[in-house]
Image (cartoon, rainbow, N blue to C red):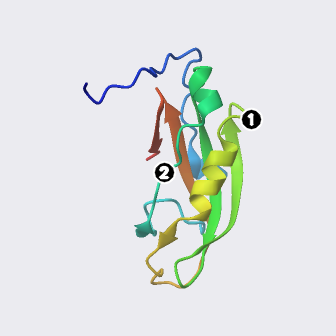
Amino acid sequence: MGCATKDVFKPRSQYPPDPWVKGYSNPDDCLGGEKLAARNFELPAYPRRAFNTGRQGWVIMRLDVSAQGMTENVEVERSIPDGYFENASRQAVKNWTFAPPKVGALRNCRVLLRYRFGIVSLGG
């Protein structure tokens, strides 16, 4: 037997257009990838209910990063569609760690998580 699984993602919803993440932030906020250097960075698993119902969407996460590189104050800023991806996103991001930021603690960092075709990825 090969590595194939019998679970195949069958989209039943269109993937919503990616949001303009900078539009949710202030000029002094940090955005994922600009000031963050990940140390422990595991993406969430695609939620089973969303997978089974063919849901696709995205989540903008807001978080702070301490001077030691630990995530703090993790919140869902916006999620499309509501009720499918928030918990998985929140739990994953709470476990992320980063290299200590060169400028000290970072506040109001934003990261886009895409849930598309049964796969989770980071937005750019």
Q: Is residue 25 visible?
A: no
Q: Which residue is mark 2?
A: 43
Q: Position of residue 53 (x, y in %)?
A: 62, 20
Q: Position of residue 36 (x, y in %)?
A: 45, 68
Which picture quadrant has residue 105? bottom right
Q: Residues within 10 Å of mark 1 (few under 14, many from 20)?
A: few
Q: Position of residue 52 (x, y in %)?
A: 59, 22
Disc 1 residue type?
A: Gly
Q: Residue at 48% x, 51% y: name it.
A: 43
Q: CA distance from mark 2 to mark 1?
A: 18 Å
Q: Is residue 2 visible?
A: yes
The correct choice, above or below, for 93 with respect to 97 in the image is above
The correct choice, above or below, for 103 with respect to 73 in the image is below
Q: Residue at 57% x, 48% y: name it.
A: 21
- SS at mark 1? loop
Q: Which residue is mark 1?
A: 83
Q: Residue at 46% x, 56% y: name it.
A: 42
The correct choice, above or below, for 2 with respect to 78 in the image is above
